Amino acid sequence: MNNLLSLGLLMVLGATSEASTTQPSIQEACPIPYVTVGGHCLFFDALEEGTWQHSRNFCEQLQGHLVKIETDNFMADVFYHIHHHGLADASFWIGANDLAQEGVWKWHDGSDVRMGTPFWAYVADRPPKQEPQGGTKENCVCLNKYYLYFFHDYECGLEFSPICEYSANKSISRDFIVNGLSDKEEEKVEEDKEKEGEDEDKKQKEDEDKEKEEENQKKDGEEVNKEEEKEEVNNFLPTSLTSQCPPPSPTWVKEGKDEDGKTNAVLVSTSNTTTSAGTAGTMSAAPTAGTTSFTDN
């Protein structure tokens, strides 16, 4: 698949090579740090990485915008510049997005993004599918090195390098060329970074709170189940196990026989009620509580 895409792009490059040679030389018509690429003033900053929004702000500080690629000739010039200036290790944000309305792709100036071939990448699938395929989650377009720098939609919060295009109706001050961004402009860039970080921290905290709440609900549910099981056990058992147990067996202590051959014994018991012993003989209740005599046959 990649070989076919490369062949197609090389055909585009071949068709536009003559037009490219007629473009002005580097820096002939573009202010620093922009260079001339296909008749446009572009700045490829492979060392700068950020979200799509951060990259857009970065280009605005340079009196430009994220690049707008609306012809196959210009796309071939961009591809050629990337591969012949040591930039092929980076992936680049461009200006196309569908943030305003899902599925309606626009450039920074509100013009429509051209769809289909030769702009949008194909995904290696069976059958092959052409981008964009990201749905509501992927709303910003990147020239990704893994897709040979064809258009590919991604989540806007991912970090890639910017390709800035100089706005002809704006001018870059000499102070910027010499000193870079002003303190105020640097402060704005830092504020944008902090805001992006705060949004990420907020989302992470919400996820953690949700996970903690789910754990607490699970724990509460386990405690309720334990209480219900305990209640079922208590309902099953009698209120007093000792009420259904027989009284302890009496203890007989023999005292010997009298002159009539009768045997006297003393009953030692935990209650005043006497029971029949499982011994041979006839029992009769003694006049004294806890004492029983019987006749030994």
Image: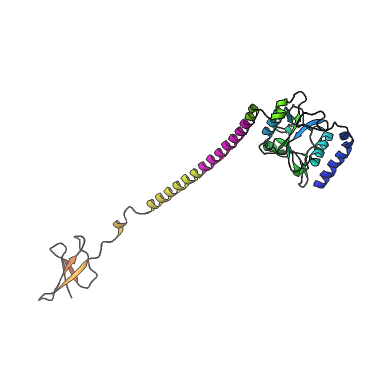
Residue 117 seen in this snapshot: no
Q: Is residue 252 magenta?
A: no
Outermost residue, front direction? 178
Outermost residue, left direction? 259
Q: Is residue 247 above or below residue 204?
A: below
Q: Position of residue 195 (x, y in %)?
A: 60, 32
Label the magenta part by its dominant secondary structure. Answer: helix
The quadrant holding residue 76 is: top right
Residue 254 seen in this snapshot: yes
Q: Nearer the viewer, residue 212 or 76?
A: 76
Q: Nearer the viewer, residue 116 or 14?
A: 14
Q: Is residue 11 above or below residue 288?
A: above
For image coordinates 72% across by 29% down, the residue present is: 177
The quadrant holding residue 149 is: top right
Outermost residue, top direction? 169
Left or right of residue 289, residue 136 in this image? right
Q: Position of residue 182 (x, y in %)?
A: 66, 27
Q: Position of residue 40 (x, y in %)?
A: 80, 30
Left or right of residue 201, residue 57 in this image? right
The quadrant holding residue 52 is: top right
For image coordinates 18% across by 70% down, the residue present is: 253
For image coordinates 83% across by 45% down, the residue present is: 4
Q: Report the span colored magenta.
A: 189-214
| Colour logic | rainbow
Q: Is residue 191 magenta?
A: yes
Q: Nearer the viewer, residue 67 or 240?
A: 67
Left or right of residue 269, residue 40 in this image? right
